[in-house]
Amino acid sequence: MLPPKIPADAALFLDFDGCLVEIAPTPDAISVPPALPGALARLYRRLDGAVALISGRSASELRGFLPDFPGIVAGSHGAELSLPGQPIRPIDDEGVDVGALQRRVAALAAEHPGLLVEAKPHGVALHYRAAPELGCWVTQTMQALAGDYPSLVLQPAKMAVELRPASAGKDRALALLMQHPPFAGRLAIYAGDDLTDEAAIAEAQDRGGIGIKVGPGDSVARHRLADPNAMLRWLEDAA
Ligand SMILES: O=P(O)(O)OC[C@H]1O[C@H](O[C@H]2O[C@H](CO)[C@@H](O)[C@H](O)[C@H]2O)[C@H](O)[C@@H](O)[C@@H]1O
């Protein structure tokens, strides 16, 4: 079912990769649709600032792709929060030596051409999009590493597996933001395309709001948009 038009009392939470931008061969190869920044800025004004991005990417990277986005960004699957004009801060400090973890993953990945290691402020992702035959190996390797890091959890993603803080989560980021202005008291809407988005989609729906799955695949969402292009048209329709 298509989502309804965005109401003026909405609190809008949007995923980034696969939702606002098309999936690309590598994380830095994405392109932001030229009309997207303007649509987000207009919605931000129309919803009195109640528009946030909740992404698996680091907040600083996301700000780099959308430098003029005026709203809040929750990065690293909700492990960090970026308020406009303020330094990015972690929601929780896990006390993990992330650098050492990233070096371990890089050393393991070096034995397998085609793998890509993405270092994040609070974890690490291992991408196998260029070597899909290594998917099982990547999952098993990251699973084995997870045993050494009790405060991290395995986060399966599109052609990637990540270790991220267990205390984070896009659902928790949404719940946290909904406690504060300008989001509090509004109708929560969450849209995303990936496994990491499912808990946040459920969280929005449990609050009486709207959950939207972008693209194909199973989802708890009651609404669906075909792809980032359809998402942009839906945003523009309300902006
Ligand atoms: O929560 P999101 O904003 O959707 O971010 C999820 C992950 O997106 C990126 O990886 C994915 O997109 C890449 C670019 O299209 C693609 O090459 C990769 O295969 C996908 O897994 C990003 O690199 C990750 O850090 C995000 O967690």
Image: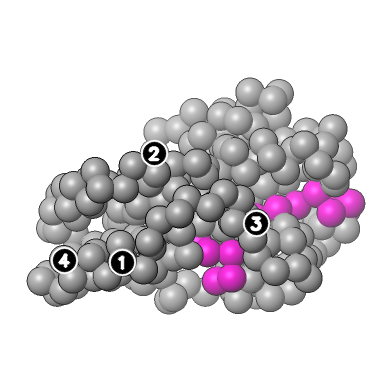
Q: Position of residue 44 (x, y in %)?
A: 82, 57
Given the image, on which type of amino acid does mark 1 rest? Answer: Ala
Crowding around mark 1 (Cα neighbors within 10 Å: few <14, some 14 to 19, many 20+) is few
- The answer to whether residue 19 is magenta is no
Element type where label 1 sits in the image = helix
Q: Disc 1 designates what residue?
A: 100
Identity of the residue drawn at 52% across and 44% down: 168
Q: Earlier in the sequence, mark 4 or mark 2?
A: 4
Which tag is nearer the camera, tag 4 or tag 1?
A: 1
Q: Position of residue 115 (x, y in %)?
A: 22, 69
Given the image, on which type of amino acid does mark 4 rest? Answer: Leu
Identity of the residue drawn at 72% across and 58% down: 72
Cβ–Cβ under 8 Å for marks 2 and 1: no
Residue 106 in view in this figure: yes
Within the image, what quadrant is residue 29 found in? bottom left
Q: Earlier in the sequence, mark 2 or mark 1?
A: 1
Q: Disc 4 designates what residue?
A: 108
